Amino acid sequence: MIKHSNDSLAALDLPDLELRLYTQSVDLNLETRNRNGFTGVIGISGLKQDNQYGGQRFFVPNYILYNSAAYTTIRWRKMKWEVEAGARVDYREQSVYRNIKGAVVQNDYQFTNPGLSAGLLFKQDSSISWTLNAGTAYRPPSINEWFSNGLHHGTATFETGDSTLGVEKAYNVIGGVRIQKRKLAVDASIYYLYIKDYIYLIPDESPVLTISGAFPSFAYSHVDASFKGVDLSIDWDITRGINLRSRNSLVFAWNHTGNRYLELVPSPRFDQLLSYRFNDTKSWKELTLGLSALIVAEQWRYDEGRDYIPPPPAYVLPGFEASATFSHAGQEIRMGLSVSNLFNTSYREYLNRFRYYADETGRNITLRLTVPLSFKTAAHDHEH
Amino acid sequence: MNTIKIISIGIFTFSILLLASSCKKDKTDDPAPTNQGELITTVQLIFTDTITGLVVDSATFSDPDGPGGVAPTQDSILLQAGRVYSTEVILLDESKNPVENISDEVAAESDVHLFVFTAAPASGFLTTTISDIDVNGQPVGLESYLVAGSSATGSYTLELRHFDSAALKQANTSYETDVQVTFGVRLN
């Protein structure tokens, strides 16, 4: 609910915008026993959603949605190999009710969406395994993608839906390798995802002018899009006490319908943490100091004029963290100090809708103290 | 084992029943129209020459269908350089029939409302002095004087701030912007 800006509603003690969403879901799963390396799961699931709005400001219409699904997966394991196949079908029925100038208009929609997946896992040895997965998934448009029409209460942008948008059809393939050694853990994956009729919110050509000022305007639209990317995470105990934790992701997207870059896709992101752990002493344990750096590149895959402002420049956010456990007379105190955005860099994040108006948060210092309460008596301790 | 199975089936059946019966008759399928409350669709500025006492110009920003839909229409302000005008602000809800006068409501709650006028360029162009006050002696802005400086073109922005309380109005903090409209201005 949003505070009223409106006197006649205020007098009636009514909100400006009120949304009520009731969701209920139920799942039933049946798992079979292992027979000659085969295991299987079969299940059904049901969901009901009921949305109502009130107040004066319109955002999404009332609707009732029923979704029922049936799914099965079969897995076969032998030696170093594991094969998995799955299928799912969803049936969705949705009724939308809108009050257009006093008359209630009802629209009913039905969708049947099949989904398939297949996976392969190869355990090369006890520390290295390879995976390959492929799948398809269909997703019907959600209510806001079709019918939203108004000022978004959270982002101060004007959003317009499109009720001609169809079902999203995704096809993906992903390969990965996982290395799990005593001092080194690596998780790497590479993927390709093609989405036919990909639904997304794109900036309009011009802002919407209202009596309370101009607001950036966005409309739901669909295009055929592809995403390819790499994710890499490393945890490495380099030498005694020194540890590197690295998380990296890259994604490249393309709009096949318009033959240009796809808007609003995350830019390359590299998050590194180098930490040193001191030897434990009698009263200090797990004393760790760490320096981190979050490096986010500029999204250069952008066509001039496709947004109200171009993607923000690259930024580097150094950080610091320290943690330790102090114990005295059997009582432990855990302490942690972390500072993000150490140098109070002003920066903006491409995917944050507030970037049109404001910088992201500055330096953030967090101090945590944890004092575990132990109600055990000394006598009790002796018994154990 | 069997008992667990029976309990599970029981829970599942109960959930299904709950799912089916939850659909009690409510107003989901009978939504009320939006915008039934007050909506400000129109801002009018009326300029009266303080010497002649004649209305010399009025500028209107009008968006009868509210935010979105048909784009609003907007006038610009044309005044004489070197004159002093008295300005009256009129707010209307033209989506209603008959048209509702919202400035009366603002006047009735003047202790939580404040108009802020901003001119660009900031100096030597347009100078505003609010002439009406609320019960606490604070300015309101439904009525004001406007001194027109040397001839130039620029803009004049009117903002209506709606405060959470009269005390917060005096502190000029914690408000929502009900109206924010910028007019183009030419001083001849």
Image (spheres, coloured by chain):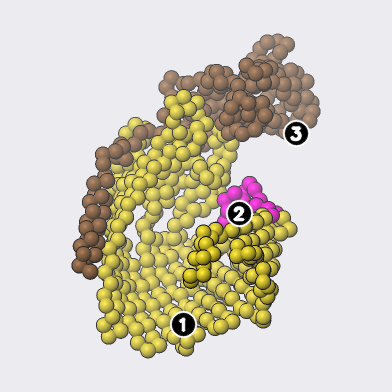
Mark 2 and mark 1 in contact (Cβ < 8 Å)? no
Instruction: Name the amino acid type tagged 3.
Output: Pro
Q: Looking at numbered disc 2 in the image, what kind of residue is underneath it?
A: Gly
Q: Quadrant of residue A315?
A: bottom right
The nearer-to-camera label among 3 and 1 is: 1
* Colour assignment, chain B: brown
On residue A130, the disc is: 1
Q: Between residue A106 and residue A5, name the one nearer to us.
A: A5
Classify B134 as above or below A68: above
Query: Which residue is farthest top?
Result: B52
* Residue A116 at x, y percent in the picture: 34, 71
**Dominant SS in magenta:** loop
Residue at x 65% of width, y 56% of height: A367
Image coordinates of residue A195 in percent, x first then y, are 43, 65
Q: Position of residue B139 (x, y in %)?
A: 67, 21
Q: Residues within 10 Å of mark 1 (few under 14, many from 20)?
A: some
